Structure formats: C-alpha cells, structure tokens
Amino acid sequence: MFAYYLQLGLRSLRKNPLLTLLMVLAIGCGVAASMTTYSVFRATSNNPIPDKSSQLFVPQIDNWGPESTQHNKGEPPNAMSYTDAINLMRDKRAKRQTALYPAQMSIVPTDPSMLPFRETSYAWYTDAFAMFDIPMLYGHPWTANEDESHAAVVVIGKELNEKMFNGVNSVGKNINLNGRDYRIVGVADRWNPEPVFYDVTNTNGFDDPIEVFMPFTRAVELQTATNGNNNCSHDPGKGWDSWIRSECVWLGFWAELPTKSEADAYRSYLNGYAAEQQRSGRFRWAPNNRLRNVTEWLEYQKVVPQEAKVSLMVSLGFLLICLVNTVGLLLAKFMRRSSEIGVRRALGAPRKEIYLQFLIEAAAVGLAGGVVGLLLTGLGVMGVSLVFEPDVAKLAKLDLSLVLLTMLVAVLTTVLAAFYPTWRAAQVQPAWQLKSN
Amino acid sequence: MQIKPILSALRRHKAGTFLIAMQIALTLAIVCNALFIIHQRIAHLSEPTGIDEPNIFVIKSEWVGHPDSARVDAMIREDLQVLRQVAGVQNVTPSNSYPLRGSGWDDSVKLKPDQLQDSSGATIYFADQNFIDTLGLKLIAGRNFRADEIGHMDMRYRLAPPVVIVTKALVQKLFPGEDAVGKTIYLIGGPGTIVGVVDLLQAQSVERWASDFAYRSVIIPERLNISLGSFYIVRAQPGQLDSAMHAAVKALFAQNPRRVINDDDGVLSFSDVRSRAYESDRGMAILMGVISVVLLAVTAAGIVGLTSFWVGQRRKQIGVRRALGATRRDILRYFMTENLLISSGGALFGVLLAIAMNLWMVTRFEMHRLSLTYLVIGAVMLLLLGQGAVLAPALRASRVPPVEATRSV
C-alpha cells in the first residue's frame, strides 16, 4: 500500500508541476537557511571539552573594588593580577591549577637563510596538560620540578614539529625561541578545542592552535610581555617589577575541581582568601569572587557571536513562514482533488487510508524539498565566510550529521505542515462530491 | 465596490484567509527587522575614520628576541629612515595602533588629578611629528608637535606626556564651547597640556564597547618601544600604493632581517583594514538582504498558489456573476480587494509582531529600537507585493466566460 500511495503521490505532484515546484523550493530555501545558520551556531556554541566542562573552573577575584567594577554590573575583572595568580598557585587548593597567558614567541630557525616566524605560544604550568586533556605525540609534559626551577624547556605542537623537524620525534632537541635555546621535552598531538575556551578573553573564542607551550615561571623570569590584553585600574608605575606587583589584570587562571563539594570548598577558599586580603588592607571592600565552569564561562563571555544568534533566529522565522506557505499550497492541492477523494471514500476507503495517502504525498514533497535544501545548504555553508569572520566561518562544515538533520527537518516539517490539509481532505463528504458530478 | 459580499465569502475560506494573513504578518515582521539591521550595519560601516584612506598602508613589524627599550628605539628610527627613502612613500610615522585596528591602548581622561570618576574614555595614539601629515588629519586649532618634543617610552613607563593633541570630539566632551588649547587633561600616569586639536580621528575599535568614545582620541608625542614590535603607518604618493607596499617590506628586510612581518596581516592597505574591521557588519547586511528577498518571493508564491486555487474553486460562481452582468473589471476588482483586505489584516498583525520581535531583540542582543519608518515601508511593501501576486490569478478569473454558469462541472 505504501508503494502504491507513493506512486499516487508522485503522479499527483507531476500533474501540478508549478505548484509542486513552489512547495519544494519554499521548503528547500527554508531548510537551507536555517541549516546554514545552524551550522555556524553549532560550531560556535560547541562544548570544547565535553568530558570536563563541569570540572574546570575559572576563578575571578575582585581586586579593583566597586569603583571600577560598577562599569560592569559589579562583576570582578575577567582576568587575574599576577599577585593573585601566584598566591592561588602557591596555595594549590584545587586538584590541578594553572595560571596562563599568551606569550609572544618568534621561532628562529638554525638555518640562517630562513626568516624568523611567529607561532601562537602560551606560558602555563605543567598541570594544564592533564587538565585540558592535551594528547602527546612524543615525550611528556615538563615536570612540576621544572616549573619550580624555571627550566628552559618547551612542548611544541605537531605542526611546528613538522615544519622544523619534518615530523620526526624531536624530543631532546633544542629550539631557538626569541633568541634563546629551549630543550624540547614533548610534542603535543593536534589539539584545537573549538571555541578556545582556555583563553576567551584574548581570543574571543577563536584562534589558531597553540604551537609552543612553555613554563609560566620561565616566561615571567624572562619578562616576556603578554601578547593579550592588559587592563589597569590605576597607574602601575614604571618598569616590569612594579607592573607585576600592580593590580593590572592580564592572566588567565583555571582550576580543576572534579566534584561539587570540591567546587564548594574552592569557593569558600576564594572568599577566605579575599577576606584575608581585605584584612591585610590590600582590598578595601568585601570579597566579591566568581567561580564559573567552562560552560558558564563561555556563556558569560558571550563567545557565540551575536551575528550567529540573530541570524539563527531570523532563519527559524524564515522556516516558519515557508511552513505556513506549504500549509497553504498543500491545502490548495489537496482540496482540488475533492472529487477524487470522494470517489475513494465512496468505494470504501476509510478516513485512515486518506490520511495515509496524503501524508505520504507530503513526505515525498518534503523529501524533494530536503534534497533541494541540502544543495542550498552546501552553497550556504560555502558562503558563510562572506558573513562571518574567517576564524568562525571555517568551523562551519557540512558533515554527515548536518546532512541527516537537513533531510529530517525537511521531511518532518513538511509532514507536520500537511496535517491540517490532510485533515481537511479526510473531511470531504463523498456524497457531496459525487452529487455534483 | 461592496466589501460585505467579500467578507462573507472569506468567512467560508477561513483557513486560506488565515494562512495568507499569517504569512504576510510573519514576513512583515522579519523583513522590517532585517531592513532595520541592514540600515544600521551600513550606517555603522560608513562612519569615517578621518584619515586619507586611499593612500595609506600599515606595516606590522615584530622584533625577534628580546631587545631592550633603547635598542628598539634605535631600530625604529633606522626603519623610519629606510622607509622614507622608499620610492613612492610620501610620509611615515610609527604608532601603537590605528583606526579600525580593533585593539590598542584605551585610557581614561580626567580633568583633575584627584577625580574619582573618569570624564571620558579615549583611544591613545602614540605618534611623532609626522603623524598628522601621514594620516592626512586636519589641524583645526593650535599646532603640531615639534620634533624636539618627541620622546620615547617603554610599555611599562608612566603615561604622562607633557603635551598632547586631541580630537574635536574629545574637546566637545571635556570643554564644550571653550578653546581647549592650553588646557590640561590627566591621563592614567599624569597631566598633559593640549597644544593642538584635530578635526576627526576615529578610535581604534568600532565595537560596541568602544562606542562611548568613538571619536575621542589623544595623540601622544612618544614612540612606544616595546619588544613585541610596532606599526609603521605609511602614506604613499597618490597612485603608488601597491608598489610602495612591496618596496617598503623589501627595504625593511634588507635593513634588518631579524624581524617578523606576517604573511597574512603584516602589511595591509587601509582598504584591507577597513574590510577586515567591518567583515561581520557587511556579512550581516548581505545575509539579511538575501533572506528578505527570498522571503518576499516565497510569500508572493504562496499568495499566487492559494489565490489560483480559490479562482479554480469559484469558476462557477464567477460565471454566474458574469452572466448576471458583472464586467471583467468587477471580477478583477473583487479579487484585488479581497487580497487587500486579507493583506491589511495581516500587515496590521505583522506590525505588532515586528515591534514585539524588535523589543525582544533589544533585550536579548542589545539592538536599537525599530523606527516607525521601517514599519510603514514594510507594510506598504507587503501590500504592494500582495496586489502584485494576486494580479495573475485575478486576471485569469476575470477571463472566466459567463457560459461557465451553465456548465455542471
């Protein structure tokens, strides 16, 4: 019966090619618009570290006071001062923790004919490798002792290893960064979380993968300036030393707190820490801290571009209009066949059969709309780079799940739209139709 | 034209009437908001920078290693010398940033040293005496920096230049109606005396967070020597931009190869800078435009489809009317009026929907309030669209012959 209804459906679609074409195009456009924008939305609202997004936390400490934070609804600064970061590192109250910042490093090739080049570089503590689940291709991260001793060691990324060492195991070799030699202790495999949750404040969530990881302590000892933002509420004074002792904020901080009780304990630790700073006279205000996990942090930092949200909304509205349109056209199409329905009903077909026949016909339309939609989505995803920044646009891709979703949305919404016209069709009175003939 | 028979006919076609009205309402709501977004984005990306854009390019040169401040200053001065010799280069100035770059140094400006609240935010541009000429700024009061006033500072030095040049927009904020030359402003590190005022110079960022001080800039007579690197803003002789860009990079590497000038953003003509800065605004405008056009087409197609169906359904009634003396024009007018009634209802509801949608977006996405003009434009557009779409089926209806009344099928 199913095959027969499908055949009937296809025949009726062929009978009214213009109407059918209109429906298919409307569904195709609606589905394509919403799927294209959804692909961007999906990429930007992706959970970058699903296994740990509720275990990794960003502590924020208000070291500026109400005078400065009132501009931001009383929220503490988005980054941390060197003083607070070092105190939190020293207290080690979390399972793992790291302070971090983007340190600008130029790689100086040993071959003098090659020009120096720059790679994305971060300075952090060795805990970060385990916290962020960074896969290692060769070797290991440096040790905690090497953190303490400000050792001249680095972990490099896979791409840099390809570029400098043709991809062979380079552990134990030296690499020249900013004119100084560093011993390579490990090569990280490709690690490119999207969005780059570990440093949202400096990247807005999208950046090239890290190719140089170096000990935080070493970078600070060499007075390596941050390549990211530095915000000061007051004049920090002259020179590096007064800068790192100042209340300027420029560091990221992450703590791994696997259970809720650990997170609660850390929260009260932060409050205790701020209260202590208040007693010592450094803070002249009550503790005002935050502790946000990855998901909350990305939400708070508004990583999903406004463009993606607005266009997803508009596209969903678009899909809705296409559906209303389809309801109308299907209604016209089905009601035009009142006499045919009358004959079928008079010959004994129950309403259920009429429902089935027309829903199958609608599904066929939906399927055709899906195919058109898929083609248009493909075009749309290619055109995304016209609308969004390249960093964001390259994340949107047409993969299997998007293909399946497109078809599913097309068929489902069309069948949904067909309910009312089908119901009307099934209400046709056989006697009424037969009489007028 | 009598409206009553139309209304009673519509009452028998509730579903179709409702669908067309709904479609018009939703389309109106979305198209209004889309047009509004397009207009806002275009207005935003047409804001002037105040500089001589067609002839300017920017080089970002990053130092390798960790040279100290004095060494950096020497290298910058050597580079400036080299760039000045390059064929096609008219002038050059070192800076820490430039309009539309999207990051740089923003500071707070106060009128007294002990003031708690800032008087204004401002973008800080580090510059030498060639800055005004290189960028093509218009000095409207006071004077330019003298060569002997140009100092140099490290990133970690105190920002307290003895003299500064500010923009007219900042003067209007700080000293409305007064002559600002000779007055003192306080930056984060200390006081500076205003010696000159330039007409227009946009801040480094055009993002929403910087919109408070969009044109409030302070020009500082210092070279900012940081080990990371610096920007050279170069003004080419008219028509020699491309050749000057190539020659400049080559000359810099010949002078000192221990530097990084990135392939993708190391050298940018100002039109590149502009298109990068407004990428998402332009994209959004294009997207909204495409969506609006397709949406209007879909709605028109829907109206054509449903009205055709109605015409087909009512052939007999039309025939009867024609037989009873109605002219073709009467039939045509009937369907046009019918559509106008439905569309008006839909447009009315659509206006409400558009306002609701905009209010929701205002709270959710920090958008502006929709102005009434867009609602009027949108409503008129959709009414015209409806009339246009209904024309073909209505013409077909008007051609139904009176003899149709006598046919039984």
Image (cartoon, grey):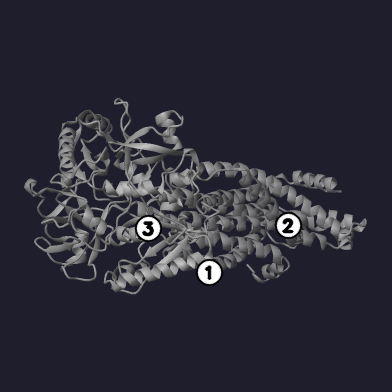
Q: Looking at the image, is mark 1 or mark 3 nearer the viewer?
A: 3
Q: Is residue A25 visible?
A: yes
Image quarter in which the C terminus of chain A is found: bottom right
The residue that appears at 44% across and 50% down in the rendered structure is A128
Q: Residue A89 got which mark?
A: 3
Q: Report whether B372 appears left or right of A220.
A: right
Q: Chain of mark 2?
A: A
Q: Position of residue A361 (x, y in %)?
A: 77, 50
Q: According to the image, label 1 marks what residue?
A: B352
Question: Chain letter of disc 3?
Answer: A
**Label 3 crowd bin: few (<14), some (14–19), many (20+), radius 10 Å:** some
Relative image position of residue A392 (x, y in whole percent)? 46, 47
Circle 2 packing at 10 Å, graded few (<14), some (14-19), many (20+), is many
Marks 1 and 3 sit apart, C-alpha to C-alpha, by 56 Å
Q: Amino acid at mark 3?
A: Met
Residue A74 point in image, percent of width and height: 36, 70
Q: Which residue lies under the disc numbered 2?
A: A418
Label 3 to label 2, Cα distance in Å? 62 Å
Relative to A2, is A165 on the left or the right? left
At a point 57% along the width and 58% down the height, the residue shown is: A317
Kind of element beneath mark 3: helix
Picture coordinates of residue B311 (x, y %)?
71, 56
Closer to the chain start, of discs 3 and 2, is: 3
| Residue A73 seen by the camera | no
Q: Residues within 10 Å of mark 1 (few under 14, many from 20)?
A: some
Q: For the residues tagged 1 and 2, is the chain the same?
A: no
Residue type, label 1: Leu
Helix, strand or loop status at disc 2: helix
- Depth order, front residue of B373/B178: B178
